[in-house]
Amino acid sequence: MYVYDTQSHEPTETVGTNPMTEHILIVGGGIAGLSAARELAPDHDVTVLERDAIASGATGHASGLVSVVADYAERREAARYSIESFREFDGTGQFSFHERPFVQLRTTPELPGLREEAADFRDDGFAVTAHDGASLADRYPDMFDTSAHAGAVVFDDAGWVDPYTYAATLADEAVSEGAEIRTNTEVTELIVDGGTARGVRTDDGEVRADQVVVAAGWRTPDLAGVDLPVRPFRYQTANLETGAEISDYPIAWDQESRLYWRPEHNGDLHVGGGAYYVSEPGSIRSTTVEGFKRLVAGTIPDRLPALTDARFATDDTCPSGDAATPDHLPIIDSPSNGPTGLVVATGLHGFGIMAGPAVGRAIRAHVTDEDAPFPLEPYRADRFEPDPSWEFPYIAPTAAETGP
């Protein structure tokens, strides 16, 4: 991939190379920024500034689940756009979309409610079915112990991707259309002239542009100079050596433990969850907490009886954290409390990979004033009450509360 390492670049003011084309500056080389760069590069001069390497933050530590139909259940137009985009992007460069059903092991509601939920999805054209223990066992023989669950909902429009390969392929696609990606460039401040965003200041000088997109995770409010309801949180993952044949295992999520898992190509089981808010933004953590490990050890053998001998191989956590919003949906907007010419994209809430296609398209819609193929109102920055609640059930208040 062709990137521009600015450690050898002399400070300069940068403008678009084509005077007839708007120059769009994107701050952030994660999934949101790279998705936007790919969307905008065919008809704009695009420069991406990344403080480290591409996908070096939350993107590179993600699990790569594409369970967007389930996780964006109330935003189905965006979910449909994303899942169809992954199918179309499959085979581009080194990228592969591994289609795999997504099984939600549910404790609530009871089976009639689960069947009604599945029927509602089917009415919208998605392949979703509800199961009791017996019918789930028929579909996945000798795989799940569902004795502690009311049933399961299976989403066939799902799969997983390798996060870094996906990000790198997006970057390659953007560069092939003329975008410039500068790594190792620390953005320090937004440049605002006459109420309009005109570029940014970096540790390597000023970079000027016609519009600025800030897609820098939980750092976005500070870099954009706008007040947004965003908090950093950290999720955790582990890879388990199973000693079993799990290549046909689906992706799954367990409502009781709030853990998810999927098979790896090497036969390991990738497990994630144990999310908690980061009390000190910017603090770095490189290992998972003991509570998460105990939660995994107590859940996987119970839910997947064939894996009683599984053992930890590796573990990981997003070092500085991802960004959460009070309602778990992202903010993608030209905020009214910011300058004109500014677009922000943040609060991807751990769903950044799976929502990447929709996020990129939404950013383009704000930059160009085009219509998007799905409503943008759910992602407005001003949708929250003045004092929003942060009691989201799947993120613990502290690291100590991520497991038993």
Image (cartoon, rainbow, N blue to C red):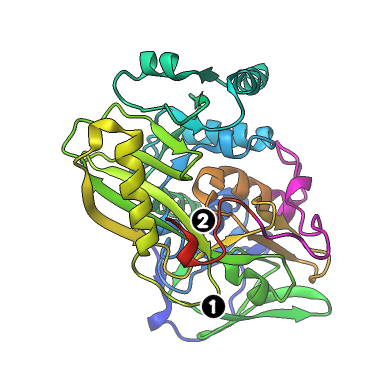
Determine which residue is flagged by label 1: 280
User: Which residue type carries mark 2?
Assistant: Leu
Determine which residue is flagged by label 2: 34
Measure the alpha-carbon separation of dots 2 and 1.
27 Å
**Residue placed at 48% from the left, 36% from the top?**
86
**Place of residue 292 in the rendered image (x, y in percent of width and height, measured from the top left):** 39, 57
Q: Is residue 362 visible?
A: yes
Residue 64's disc number: none
Per the picture, the main secondary structure of the magenta-coloured stretch is loop
**Residue placed at 47% from the left, 66% from the top?**
399
Depth check: give the residue in front, 382 or 236. Answer: 236
**Residue placed at 28% from the left, 41% from the top?**
264
Farthest left residue in view: 243
Q: Is residue 263 visible?
A: no
Q: Which residues are magenta?
A: 365-391
Of the numbered discs 2 and 1, the one sitting upstream in the chain is 2
Q: Which is closer to the viewer, label 2 or label 1?
A: 1
User: Which residue type carries mark 1?
Assistant: Glu
**Place of residue 355 in the rendered image (x, y in percent of width and height, measured from the top left):** 56, 45
Depth check: give the residue in front, 5 or 357. Answer: 357
Residue 86 counted in the magenta span? no
**Place of residue 261 in the rendered image (x, y in percent of width and height, measured from the top left):** 38, 41
**Place of residue 249 in the rendered image (x, y in percent of width and height, measured from the top left):** 32, 29
Q: Quadrant of residue 323?
A: bottom right
Question: Considering only vertical position in the picture, is 314 above or below 306?
Answer: below
Dot 1, how many residues are within 10 Å of its Cα: few (below 14), some (14-19), or many (20+)?
few
On the picture, is 374 further left or further right than 354? right
